[in-house]
Each structure stands twice: as structure tokens, then as C-alpha cells.
Amino acid sequence: EPEVTQTPSHQVTQMGQEVILRCVPISNHLYFYWYRQILGQKVEFLVSFYNNEISEKSEIFDDQFSVERPDGSNFTLKIRSTKLEDSAMYFCASRRGGGVDEKLFFGSGTQLSVL
Amino acid sequence: GQNIDQPTEMTATEGAIVQINCTYQTSGFNGLFWYQQHAGEAPTFLSYNVLDGLEEKGRFSSFLSRSKGYSYLLLKELQMKDSASYLCAVSSRPRTDKLIFGTGTRLQVFP
């Protein structure tokens, strides 16, 4: 079965450094997302992306965050200047179409640790 | 506000039946998803309910009552591999594209 792939699986960085989390969504999918999960807490929505632009973002997704789809396959999340509280598991997700019952396919996540 | 509640942890015995409840209060509703998440892995889709009633899919069934803001996931003939977290998530599309997740229920199945 096709899957969403994320790299790296673990990323350790110093506070204030920039990180880029990478994702390859399923090839025929059109809608892309980033979610995150702080240890012991809920999965939280960060941003959705469709037709080469952000379609929705949460209050978490401030100016330190950006997303990009640089080519036809990759979808990246950049955090410009990481903070301790950015430590979390970051999940990329995609779905094929716009139907309300369209399920999200999640990647296995990148565990980001900010020291 | 948006609120989705699930029990934090549950335990059950292999071969048994377990019901994981989810109650929600959200601004708008257009369906409820259940996802399974094994430790360190991606959440994987289990079910979607938008109409009241029971949806059965093999050993797993999911129920929805929109008037009560309530859903449950029923797992029958439990197997050790069912030990995982079960995430309830509400969709309010097209008003918003995001899924709102509950905290997840960690299920441990014992032999």
C-alpha cells in the first residue's frame, strides 16, 4: 500500500537553530498537512496545503514556521528558530481528494528534540 | 469551544471485547474518524462515521450518536497486536480542514 514517508525519523537540534522536516506524500494526493504531538498530549493541527498554497493554519503556526512544496513530490516544514517547546513528534499527512469522508494518511513522524 | 474526551488508558484480555468511548463538543460536525496508533508509528485509519448508527468492519465496529455527541469503537476477539493507542478525531469540513483529535486511549491487551 502506498505510504507517506518522513525523514529524518529523529532530529536533535539546539535552541535557536533552524530545522527542516521532510515528507513525501502519496503520489496522487492533493491535500497535505502537518500535525504535531507533544509527548503525552493530543495530536494538534498545524497547517494544511492545497494547490501550492496554505489553505489553513493554526495559532501554533506562527512566523517561525513555513511550509514548501519545492517539487512534485516533497513537502517540507521549516522551523526557523527552534524553541524548547517545539519538541514534539511531527506528522505529515496527505489525502487524495476533497470529499468529507476522505481519510488522512499519516507518515510515521519525525521526533524533534530541541535542547 | 472544541473538546473531545476519551479515557486515557484501558486494559483487556486476549479474546475479550472492549469498547472505547469518545464524547465530543465541537463547532460544527461532519464526521468522526477513529485511528489506531502503535507506539512510534503513524496513525492508521480504522473507521469513519457521519450518520448515526453502527459501522462494522471485521473485528472492529464504530458507533455514532450525533444528538449525544458520542461515539465508541468496539474491538472484538482482542489480539495482542491490538495493543495500541486509539485516537478519536472530529471533522468539521468544509468549515475547517483540520481534524480535531482527542487525547487518545492507550489499550493494553494481556494474555
Image (cartoon, coloured by chain):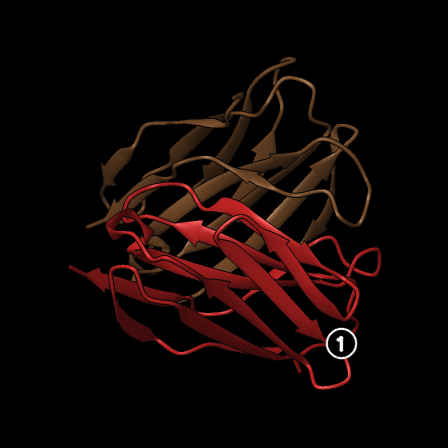
Chain colours: A brown, B red
Q: Is residue A58 visible?
A: no
A19 above or below B40? Answer: above
Residue at (25, 60) in percent of width and height: B14
The residue wearing badge 1 is B27
Secondary structure category for the residue under label 1:
loop
Above or below residue A95? Residue A27 is above
Left or right of A19? Residue B74 is right
> Seen in the image, is A1 located left or right of residue B17?
right
- Give x and y (percent) for residue B81: 28, 47
Q: Position of residue A43 (x, y in %)?
A: 47, 59
- Report the residue at 77% width, 71% height from top: B52
Count neighbours of disc 1 (C-alpha within 10 A) and say few if under 14, some if 14 to 19, many if 20 or more: few
In this picture, residue B60 sits left or right of residue B68: left
Tell me which residue sits at (42%, 60%) in the image: B76
**How far across and how far down the image is residue A41, in percent?**
38, 67
Residue A26, position in %: x, y? 59, 23
| Image height of B5 relative to A109, above or below | below
Q: Is residue A105 shown above or below B57? A: above
Q: Chain of mark 1?
A: B
Query: Residue farthest to the bottom?
Result: B68
Q: Nearer the viewer, residue B23 or B110?
A: B110
Observer-nearest of A98 and A52:
A98
Which of the image's four quarters has the N terminus of chain B?
bottom right
Residue A51 showing in the rendered view = yes
> Residue at horizontal 50%, vertical 69%?
B102
Which residue is outermost to the top?
A72
Amino acid type, label 1: Ser
Decide which of A101, B13 is in the foreground and name it: B13
